[in-house]
Image: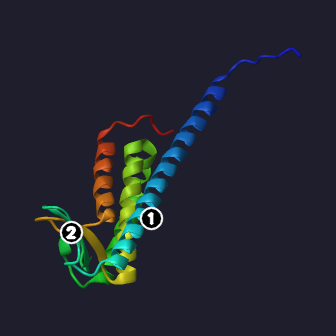
Amino acid sequence: GRRVSRRVTTDDVTRAAERRIRRTHRSRWTLALGMAVGAFILDQVIKAVVRNNMDEAGSGIELTPFLRIDRYTNDGIAFGLFPGRQGVVATLTLIALAGIALALVSLVRQNLWGAAGAGLLVGGSLGNLVDRLRFGGVTDFIDFDHWPAFNIADSAITIGAILIIMGLMEATEEPDR
């Protein structure tokens, strides 16, 4: 057979553009979800290894003169603030996560930096929240000299925030329709 050609209409072009935008948004949400799940799992697995193989502070491994792997339990928030208030900290974390999720919805759709950053921020926050609820405090183990100990979740949160700032600074790749 002979192939019949038809004219491409403005509606055809519009529908194709809309499909492309939907695919792009789906891929960014997939990236955000993958980053969140990856950060969460990596954090939880490494913390479990640390909890199962190290006693509290003092039994660690010195990697360099300024870096140790040592086990600490932080029952406060960043830098040990608000110790012993796990219920309040957990509630504030849940409220903050809900607010962050709402704020990041449009950023995730706009660019890859925002999608990756949102995923890391959410995954890290959930990792520390699980520790608070299960163990009454967050397991920290990366101990730089003259800096409070931290963990993979804390690193994911920090890197995620940096990526979000990069995403906010970058112009959107394509406008939402």
Q: Which mark is residue 152?
A: none
Of the 4 image quadrants, the one containing the N terminus is top right
SS at badge 1: helix
**How are the colours assigned in the image?**
rainbow
Residue type, numbered disc 1: Ile
Q: Is residue 158 above or below residue 96?
A: above
Residue at the location (20% across, 79% down)? 82
Q: Which residue is mark 1?
A: 41
Residue 60 % position (x, y)? 23, 73
Q: Residues within 10 Å of mark 2 (few under 14, many from 20)?
A: many
Q: Is residue 22 above or below residue 139?
A: above
Label pair 1/2, CB-CB below 8 angstroms: no
Q: Quarter-wise, where is residue 143 in the image?
A: bottom left
Q: Total of numbered circles in the picture?
A: 2
Residue 80 % position (x, y)? 19, 75
Q: Which mark is residue 149?
A: 2
